[in-house]
Image (spheres, helix red, strand yellow):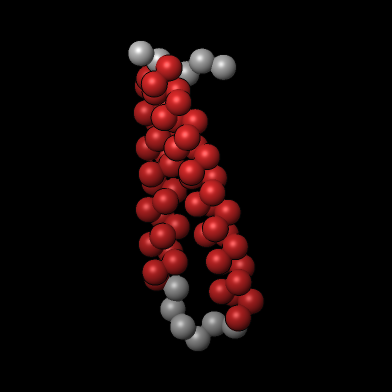
């Protein structure tokens, strides 16, 4: 599959937004919830950060190949 630079830039922007969004959620979790709440949100944060890294890799490769 071939991406244009425009689409590659969009994918990179989505990856950056996902990292920002989920890191901020992690910092804003308030104490006082049951342990399961933190486990579930920790898993969500971890998985979404992995997806963001994968999107960033795809975006960077697409950006470089679209020259």
The location of residue 33, given as percent across then percent down, is: 54, 82
Name above or below for residue 67 compared with residue 59: above
Whether 54 is drawn above or below 10: the answer is below
Q: Identify which residue is drawn at 49% across, 31% down.
A: 58
- Res 41 → quadrant: bottom right
Spot the residue most to the right.
36
* Residue 49 image point, x, y percent: 50, 52
Classify residue 38 as left or right of residue 23. right
Which residue is drawn at the image coordinates 61% and 68% (left, top)? 40
Image coords of residue 67 (percent x, y):
35, 13
Q: Horizontal and vertical percent for residue 61?
A: 45, 26
Relative height, residue 51 to residue 26 (above, below): above
Q: Quadrant of the N terminus?
A: top right
Instruction: Please give the count of numbered marks on the rendered protein.
Output: 0
Please state which of residues 43 and 65 is positioned toward the viewer in this rendering.
65
């Amino acid at each position: 599959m071939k991406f244009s630079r425009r689409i590659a830039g969009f994918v990179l922007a989505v990856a950056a937004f996902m990292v920002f969004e989920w890191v901020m959620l992690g910092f804003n979790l308030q104490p006082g919830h049951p342990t399961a709440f933190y486990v579930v949100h920790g898993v969500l944060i971890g998985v979404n950060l992995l997806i963001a890294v994968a999107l960033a890799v795809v975006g960077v490769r697409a950006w470089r190949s679209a020259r």
